[in-house]
Amino acid sequence: MLNILTFLQRHVGPSDDDVIAMLAELGFSSMSEFINNVIPDSIVFNSTLKVGDGVSEQEAIKILKSYASKNKVYKSYLGNGYYGTITPGVIKRNILENPGWYTQYTPYQAEIAQVGWKHC
């Protein structure tokens, strides 16, 4: 039989003694005193949350799976026909990096000569 641990059994948090020691180190005697001193009153939510009873992790997974089973699966054509490729260096130099393909500006002969000197 499969032994499934609950969420609380799998996650170790501070013990009650650890929490008391941490609060004492900070100068507080209780968690509510700590929260009241740390969180500004302007953002404190003083109403009661209207939430239902909690459920176990297994029950939550069951509920989520029932929601997910109602999803409709459609075909996705994103990326069809595209294949990862390597662009050869000669194509990059002569087409993609050639300003003649993406600007109307024609460099003067002197500018071309300067480029030639830079590569020597």
Image (cartoon, rainbow, N blue to C red):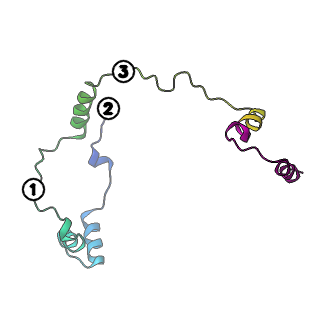
As measured in the structure, the alpha-carbon distance from the residue carrying label 3 to the one carrying label 1 is 41 Å
Q: In the shown orientation, is residue 41 left or right of residue 73?
A: left
Helix, strand or loop at mark 3 = loop
Q: Earlier in the sequence, mark 2 or mark 3?
A: 2
Q: Is residue 11 left or right of residue 16?
A: right
Mark positioned earlier in the residue sequence (2 or 1): 2
Residue 38, quarter of picture: bottom left
| Tag 2: amino acid | Leu
Gap between marks 2 and 3, in whole Å? Answer: 35 Å
Determine the residue positioned at 71% across, 44% down: 105
| Residue 47 horizontal side relative to residue 36, left or right | left
Q: Position of residue 115 (x, y in %)?
A: 83, 50
x 21%, y 35%: residue: 59
Residue at 76% from the left image edge and 38% from the top image edge: 93
Q: Which residues are magenta?
A: 96-120
Q: Position of residue 53 (x, y in %)?
A: 12, 44
> Tag 1 or tag 3, which sits nearer the N-term?
1
User: Quick check: marks 2 and 3 in contact, CB under 8 Å?
Assistant: no
Q: Residues within 10 Å of mark 1 (few under 14, many from 20)?
A: few
Query: 25 or 95, which lies in front?
Result: 95
Q: What residue does disc 3 label? A: 74
Image vertical order of residue 52 relative to residue 85, above or below: below
Q: Nearer the viewer, residue 49 or 75?
A: 75
Image quarter (top left, top right, bottom left or bottom right) of the N terminus: top left
Percent position of residue 52, x then y: 11, 44
Q: Secondary structure at mark 1?
A: loop
According to the picture, the residue beneath numbered tag 1 turns out to be 48
Q: Which mark is residue 2?
A: 2
Number of callouts: 3
Identify whether 114 is placed above or below 26: above
